[in-house]
Amino acid sequence: MKEELSGEALYRATVARCRTVLWVVAAVTLCMVGAAYAPLPQPELRVGLILAAAAFNAFLVAGHLMHLLRERNVIYSLLAFTVLFFAALMGLCVWAHGDVPLPARG
Amino acid sequence: MEIAYTVQPRPDTGVYNAKLGMWLFLASEVMLFGGLFSAYVFLRMGAPPDTWPQGWLSVPLGTLNTLLLAASAVTTLLAWAACKARRFDRFKLHLGLTLILGTVFLGIKGYEYRDKLMHYEVQLKDGRIADGHLVRARTTSDTVVLQGRWVSDRRELLDGRRAPRTHEELVLPRDQIARMQNYAPRHNTFLAIYFTLTGLHGLHVLGGLVVFAYLWGPGSRLWHVDPEHFTNRVEVAGLFWHFVDLVWIFLFPVLYLT
């Protein structure tokens, strides 16, 4: 967070930043809804676009509102473990989905 | 005995204890919601083709709720910034707005739940299927009245986006009904995971609102004794609220749009 600012200056800077973040999040959300109805050739492309937009919104909230862009190393280390576990969890889903049993030998 | 490092950062971690504690808690929350999201992915990927419902949820209401929660995340941060600026009046204003926005979010979610729980699929003994919302005022011990439509095959109900906008009143004699079920979690896998994910998220919203209400009301007495300590409490509660917003940012597209 902006340690170099304090008091009223910090408040004014936060208001300006929040205004920008809110407008961008709103615009990206509306784009996401638009993509859901857009006549795209492949459904996978639509899902990919929507999830990419959601990830961008999440980046804005986590980075600017939760101050993760300027956080202490101990928090980053903690979150690195979480990301690792979460990625493994999702990886397990994809791996298990492709793990189709072979037909029994007669 | 005074609790250490509630205001000043611990020398070894660089942050005050409550903040590190909140991040540890949020890490465990990521795993909780991650487990449920992976369950959703499993169910969705494992569903046979053309059996997963589409368009069953109201996109306008979901969009509105997304914007409400994003706005509440912003007002939470402004409440913290107001504390930093030593402006207690602005803190009250911003946190009050957060409380209102969060409450409206829950109200809309409640309306959506009610809409689902009043929505019935009724199979008659002759094989026809009626689908629509229960008209409780006109339903009697002999007849069930729905505002909806007839379908000949359950698969016609899967794509809500193709459902006709105009509904007719369907009067169904009870002795002709073979099966009647509302759109509750037991209705199908989609609704089960929908209610589980959004229900857990809703409980988090409620929990956040309770904490904010405390900080806005009786908890704000700490401001007059130790404003730095109070500001840190607002920051930690805000971190939790932003996480709740983050979860919704993914819930909305996953459940409503894809």
Image (cartoon, coloured by chain):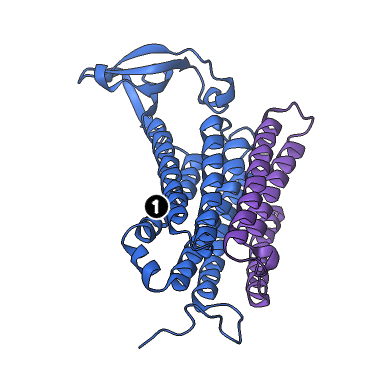
**Residue at far left of view:** B141
Q: Is residue B104 above or below residue A2?
A: above
Q: Is residue A27 above or below residue B81?
A: above
Q: Position of residue B207 (x, y in %)?
A: 40, 57
Instruction: Spot the blue chain and give its letter.
Output: B
**Residue at far right of view:** A41
Q: Position of residue B142 (x, y in %)?
A: 22, 17
Q: Is residue B208 left or right of residue B84?
A: left
Q: Which residue is mark 1?
A: B206
Q: Is residue B224 left or right of residue A7?
A: left
Residue at image location 62% in from the left, 60% down from the top: A9
Residue A36 appears anywhere in the view: yes
Q: Position of residue A65 (x, y in %)?
A: 61, 57
Residue at image location 55% in from the left, 69% down from the top: B23
Residue B91 vs residue A37, the one in the foreground: B91
Residue A103 appears anywhere in the view: no
Q: Amino acid at mark 1?
A: Leu
Host chain of mark 1: B
Instruction: Spot the purple chain and give its letter.
Output: A
Residue A35 vs residue B99, the one in the foreground: B99
Q: Is residue B26 left or right of residue A21?
A: left
Q: Quadrant of residue B204?
A: bottom left
